[in-house]
Amino acid sequence: MPDKEMTCLDCGNGFMFTEQEQQDFAKKGYRNEPKRCPDCRRQKRDGPPRGPQPERALHTITCSQCGKQSQVPFKPRMDRPVYCDDCFRATKR
């Protein structure tokens, strides 16, 4: 695999997608070639999150330990116990 000359999607600068990087991408199972130069990739990865985060839906549950009603930010599964905040903290100690 020869080195490939690429153009960054964000800054428009050229960068090399080296043979070693191509092999690393293949080992990791990545199918697509990079669209951004290493600097823009790092900036995108380390930068602030994009836009406001959506509100999480709350699900009403009955605590498996004390029977108290509570709300959790995930959809409970029937095969696993679900605890209220107090019982959850107590089980983590």
Image: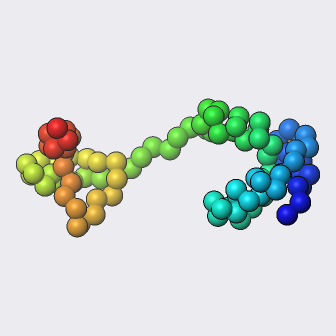
Which residue is the extreme one toward the left?
66
Q: What color scheme is it?
A: rainbow
Considering the image in quadrants, where does the N terminus appear?
bottom right
Q: Residue at x 70, y 37 (%)?
A: 42
The correct choice, above or below, for 50 with respect to 30 in the image is: above
78 on left or right of 24: left
Q: Residue at x 81, y 43 (%)?
A: 37
Picture coordinates of residue 62 (x, y %)? 16, 54
The correct choice, above or below, for 82 with respect to 42 in the image is: below
Considering the image in quadrants, where does the C terminus appear?
top left
Picture coordinates of residue 55 (x, y %)? 45, 43
Q: Residue at x 88, y 55 (%)?
A: 3
Viewer-nearest residue: 72 or 6: 6
Which residue is the extreme one toward the bottom?
79
The correct choice, above or below, for 39 with respect to 81 in the image is: above
Picture coordinates of residue 89 (x, y %)? 19, 38
Viewer-nearest residue: 69 or 23: 23
24 on left or right of 8: left
Q: Residue at x 76, y 53 (%)?
A: 21
Viewer-nearest residue: 3 or 54: 3
49 on left or right of 74: right
The tally of labels here is 0
